[in-house]
């Protein structure tokens, strides 16, 4: 956690200098790549440093990206086992409460945009999602942009694989009552790798069936593609694979693009009677990835508003 503030207007805590976004102190809270390759060289002998970087690096305070020191120290202490060390130290129930109250479109959390005043504020009496996620370490700065008015815009993202997997695991536990979730993660991962779409469909149906009934009773979310998309997103993102929500092309937006091993999956969702697969082909969304030298699979998923589950899943290779 990098910042809390506003005990009262006369509090001495409000007079502290905040160095969170001071470039001079950008690496003060983590280990740099040089630290890993020099100071920890002997302790990390035999470790795949690229994989280590993918798991625990990525935090950006307007300077060189740094590693979470808590993760690195426990990774060494536990014998080079890749686990979610930092994330498991606390249960962010407050975050779930805020997400629930705000009715956020979950896939958008990985591509949040925040202004200078928003990201720098942390009023405990009026919590807002963007500064909370940033200040508590769930999001980090991807890039910045200075506007015509000399204001800085911050583009935020999940910092690394540890946070991606853990954050979405947490959301799955919140969204569903699925006790066999860990087993199903393995099934769906293998299904995507092996292009076993029947197994993939069956597992997704089981996932949506595990959503508590009272989730639908409280509102009419079963009629919104965004809700089904959010559940799908956290489920796939928890696998640790690359997933892009609302992937922009020159002919429109792909609902989801999933990259796994030697395959690229393009997904389109519909709650209406429209044909999602036909939309993918008509707008030729796949053309964006034709030069990737990977197998491209188009998947259309239609949901039944009454059954609150998958009505139809059709797919084909490009």
Image: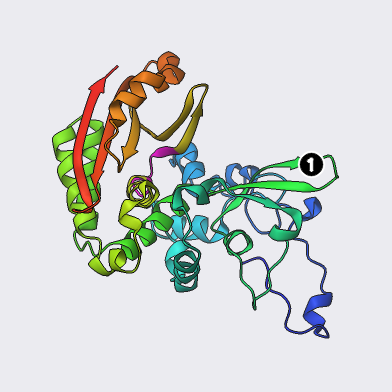
Q: Label 1 neighbourhood size at 10 Å, few (<14), some (14-19), many (20+)?
A: few
> According to the image, label 1 marks what residue?
146
Q: Position of residue 55 (x, y in %)?
A: 46, 47
Q: Quadrant of the N terminus?
A: bottom right
Q: Position of residue 310 (x, y in %)?
A: 21, 45
- How many marks do you count on the picture? 1
Label 1 sits on a secondary structure element that is strand
In the image, is residue 158 above or below residue 177? above
Is residue 90 visible to the viewer in this orientation of the structure?
no
Q: Is residue 237 left or right of residue 12?
A: left
Q: Residue at x 39, y 55 (%)?
A: 168
Is residue 254 visible to the viewer in this orientation of the structure?
yes
Range covered by the magenta-colored residues: 237-244
In the image, is residue 58 above or below residue 15? above
Q: Residue at x 43, y 20 (%)?
A: 289
Q: Position of residue 62 (x, y in %)?
A: 73, 48
State the scheme by which the image is colored. Answer: rainbow
In the image, is residue 294 above or below residue 205? above
Between 9 and 28, the one lying in front of the other is 9
Between 215 and 299, the one lying in front of the other is 215
* Quarter occupied by residue 187: top left
Q: Quadrant of the C terminus?
A: top left
Q: Position of residue 198 (x, y in %)?
A: 14, 36
Q: Residue at x 33, y 62 (%)?
A: 175
Q: Is 60 part of what is drawn in magenta?
A: no
* Quarter occupied by residue 285: top left
Between 26 and 312, the one lying in front of the other is 312
């Amino acid at each position: 956690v990098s910042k809390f503030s506003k005990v009262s207007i006369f509090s001495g805590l409000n007079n502290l200098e905040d160095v969170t976004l001071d470039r001079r102190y950008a690496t003060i809270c983590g280990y740099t790549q040089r630290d890993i390759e020099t100071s920890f060289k002997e302790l990390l002998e035999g470790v795949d440093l690229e994989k280590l970087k993918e798991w625990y690096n990525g935090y950006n305070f307007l300077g060189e990206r740094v590693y979470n020191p808590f993760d690195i120290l426990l990774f060494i202490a536990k014998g080079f086992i890749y686990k979610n060390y930092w994330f498991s130290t606390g249960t962010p129930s407050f975050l779930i409460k805020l997400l629930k109250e705000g009715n956020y479109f979950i896939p958008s959390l990985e591509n949040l945009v925040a202004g200078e005043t928003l990201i720098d504020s942390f009023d405990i009496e009026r919590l807002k999602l963007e500064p909370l996620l940033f200040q508590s370490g769930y999001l980090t700065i991807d890039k910045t942009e200075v506007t015509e008015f000399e204001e800085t815009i911050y583009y935020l993202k999940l910092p690394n694989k540890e946070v991606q997997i853990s954050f979405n695991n947490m959301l799955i536990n919140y969204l569903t009552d699925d006790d066999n979730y860990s087993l199903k993660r393995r099934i769906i991962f293998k299904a995507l790798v092996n292009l076993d779409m029947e197994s993939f469909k069956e597992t997704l149906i089981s996932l949506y069936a595990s959503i508590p009934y009272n989730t639908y009773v409280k509102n009419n979310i079963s009629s919104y593609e965004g809700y089904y998309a959010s559940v799908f997103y956290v489920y796939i993102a928890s696998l640790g694979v690359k997933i892009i929500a609302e992937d922009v092309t020159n002919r429109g937006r792909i609902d989801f693009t999933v990259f796994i091993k030697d395959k690229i999956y393009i997904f389109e969702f519909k709650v209406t009677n429209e044909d999602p697969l036909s939309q993918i082909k008509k707008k030729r969304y796949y053309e964006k990835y034709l030069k990737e030298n990977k197998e491209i699979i188009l998947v259309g998923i239609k949901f039944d508003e009454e059954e609150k589950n998958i009505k139809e899943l059709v797919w084909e290779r490009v």
